[in-house]
Image (tube, rainbow, N blue to C red):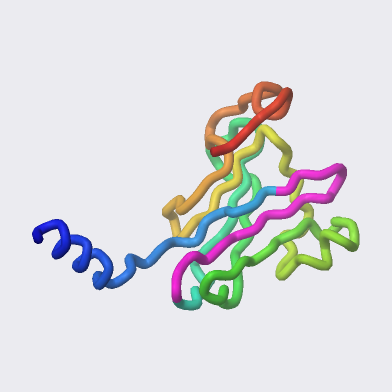
Amino acid sequence: MKLNMLLLAMLLAPAVHAEPFISEYVEGSSSNKALEIYNPADVALDLSGYSIKVFSNGATTAGKTVALKGTLAAKSTLVLTDTGSVATLAAKSNMTFGTSNFNGDDAIALFKGTEIIDVVGQIGTDPGEQQTKGPKTTL
């Protein structure tokens, strides 16, 4: 009986507001770079106050900051591409971030104000070739 009540309470509980996250990272040749941000929430998200910051070569201070703009619909994505991306990649873009200049050993973070919401890589660490050579997998 207690288990049934617990399950019922969990099903009827209001959903916790989920934060957006970096759902895809594209690093192609030259300027063919992109990021995808996903909004898992059931409501649209005002992107003012959110930004992407790039930390190059083990830096602890961002070398580039891109302020996000507009509204991201519930359960949808925002795709940011380098302004020099090829047409097929640029066609998928909702927003450009200028010249991206990131590569496999740089950390890229999604911020809400001054708080890190999500990050690809490790800020303040330059993993060198270890991060970009050989077979790699994610969970």
Q: Residue furthest front?
A: 1
Q: Residue at x 59, y 54 (%)?
A: 23
Q: Residue at x 84, y 49 (%)?
A: 31
Q: Residue furthest right?
A: 87
Residue 47 image offset from top left, x and y in percent: 53, 71
Q: Is residue 118 left or right of residue 81?
A: left
Q: How many marks?
A: 0
Q: Taking 87 as reference, is 33 above or below it?
A: above
Quarter of the image with the N terminus is: bottom left
Q: Taking 25 as reference, is 84 above or below it?
A: below
Q: Quadrant of residue 9?
A: bottom left
Residue 107 image offset from top left, x and y in percent: 60, 40
Q: Quadrant of residue 93?
A: bottom right
Q: Residue at x 81, y 44 (%)?
A: 28
Of 40 and 90, the residue lying toward us: 40
Q: Is residue 126 left or right of residue 90?
A: left
Q: Residue at x 57, y 53 (%)?
A: 22
Query: Is residue 33 part of the magenta span, yes or no?
Result: yes
Query: Is residue 35 part of the magenta span, yes or no?
Result: yes
Residue 52 image offset from top left, x and y in percent: 59, 55
Quarter of the image with the C terminus is: top right
First to last magenta residue range? 26-42
Q: Taking 52 as reference, is 13 above or below it?
A: below
Residue 44 image offset from top left, x and y in percent: 50, 77
